[in-house]
Amino acid sequence: MYQSFIGLEVHIHLLTGTKVFCNCASAFGDEPNTHVCPVCMGYPGVLPSLNIEAMRMGCTVARSLNCRIPDRTWFERKQYFYPDMPKNYQISQFASPLGQNGYMDLEGNGAPAGKRVRIKECHLEEDAGKMIHTGTVSLLDYNRAGVSLLEIVTEPDMETGEEAELFIRQLRRMVRYLGVCDGNMEEGSLRADANVSINFPGKGLGKKVEIKNLNSSRFVRLGLNYEITRQGVLLDAGREVVQETRLWNENRDQTEPMRTKENAQDYRYFPEPDLPVFAPDAAFLASVEASLVELPQARIKRFEEEYGLAADLADLICEEKAGADYFEDAVGEAVRQGLEKKDAAGRIGNRLISDIRHILSREGLSMAAVAGLRITPRRLASLVALSAGGKVSGKNAKQALEAVMTEDRDPEDIIRERGWDLLTDPELIAEAVRLVYESEGPAFEEARGTSNPKRRRTLTAYLVGKVLERTAGRADPGIAGEQIGRLIDAPRCS
Ligand code: ADP
Ligand code: ZN
Ligand code: MG
């Protein structure tokens, strides 16, 4: 067996309205080359200026990854020629990344206990443009050139494709919680390059292969596991792994060589002379602290303890920050309406991930849109309180949710007006039971005569169903069942 080492380089697009060194809008998908200016097009004589919002977002991620923010951080030029980069260098950070020496613990969902992945650094840089190859020509769209990009580099602390996939998922959820990146891997807002080597145990790192073109967390897992196997076969045969960059081919489920001699690259980094050194002051650091939020993994753990939720339910609720916020608001409301906290939490959690999620997806919305839903946390809390107090049947509670959606009114009003509240008055139920007794003579007769308890239960349920039919679903089934039982046992009058 070999030891394996995996390190990830994750790039995230920061959700700044403008690019990192000029005032062009960060907008893709628009008409090509409409968001460009002399600065991001690299005209001679122009001066970049730092987008402080990008720096704040970058530092917020860095702090959430337990990184140290240095007293002074600056930029370098990373020089290489490629048509998607009009300046022929990329402004990046080399010697003083904005975040240093952090870590993220892998948690939940099959993570090995206590697995910590060290974060080497986070640095801010600009993205390149986009090349579109069609037939014999290549087209260039520079709208993306200069867009704020944060690169997060891990130490080679992961060992399997599964761990790397978990890291990506956890990081993705984190940056979405922080509101600094939409995390869309398919559209390239979050991109991961995976580095992997294997070696004989105790021999340290092996020759590293970098895998690119991994545009989903699943491909990260598949690509890495493929590569670990491929390298193992080479070593088994006494051959060497070539240090190279490979591409994931999703049609063939394999990695393929892209370019070799990685070491030969020399970017000739040197300090960017047109940007001053950035020394975060107290006000800036305070704005970073103010942007920190309770992170998803911590929140899941708190939900388990504070609300008594099962781990998988807590995880589902915490998938999106908006969903978790909604949940806590609704539980707070329900408690104010007299429900016990854990009871309220269980009921609301289940409604949220079943009914509410269903309604959202039917409207083509994600959980992020729950904040604007007509079923507000207070309205859901009221409904849950009514059904916990036995005031409305499960079926009518569901109907009421739908009515809240179409009418935008409070569920308690809808339920009262429609008469959807549970009927518990024994006199009123007895009336319906009498009518059923008259129309369902044979069923009562059979229930009375049978010595098979199972048959009797079936018949009773059937008769309760008839009572519900006669009361538009409002009769309390427990009370109706008792009354029917008494009638079955009663000596016949005739
Ligand atoms: P480079 O200079 O080639 O970019 P870095 O030292 O910056 O290499 O590392 C890039 C990424 O590759 C990091 O995530 C790091 O953890 C990982 N890495 C470096 N060496 C190895 C190795 N031998 N095996 C696996 N991963 C590695
Ligand atoms: Zn510009
Ligand atoms: Mg590197």
Image (cartoon, helix red, strand yellow):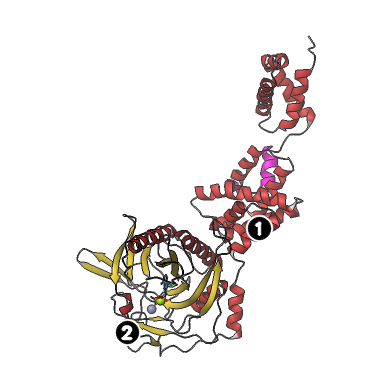
- Judging from the image, what secondary structure is the residue with disc 2 in? loop
Is 209 situated above or below 424?
A: below
The residue at 42%/61% (across/down) is 220
Using the image, tell me which numbered label, if any, was put on residue 43. Answer: 2
- How many labels were placed on the picture? 2
Is 435 situated above or below 406?
A: above
The segment highlighted magenta reads 406-421
The residue at 58%/86% (across/down) is 281
Which of the two discs, 2 and 1, sits closer to the camera? 1
Q: Report which quarter residue 444 is drawn in.
A: top right
Q: Is residue 478 magenta?
A: no
Q: Earlier in the sequence, mark 2 or mark 1?
A: 2
Q: Which residue is mark 1?
A: 303
x and y percentages locating residue 486 in the rendered image: 78, 22
User: What residue type is disc 1 on?
Assistant: Phe
Answer yes or no: disc 1 within 8 Å of ligand 1: no
x and y percentages locating residue 196 in the rendered image: 40, 67
x and y percentages locating residue 3 in the rendered image: 44, 65
Which corner quadrant holds the N terminus? bottom left
Other-residue count near label 1 (Cα within 10 Å), few / some / many at <14 / 14–19 / ≥20: many
Q: Is residue 134 visible?
A: yes
Left or right, 74 with respect to 397, comes to left
- Judging from the image, what secondary structure is the residue with disc 1 in? helix
Q: Nearer the viewer, residue 236 or 175?
A: 236
The Cα atoms of the two marked residues, 2 and 1, are separated by 53 Å
Our reading of the magenta stretch's main secondary structure is helix
Q: Nearer the viewer, residue 2 or 13?
A: 2
Q: Residue furthest left?
A: 136
Answer yes or no: disc 2 within 8 Å of ligand 2: no
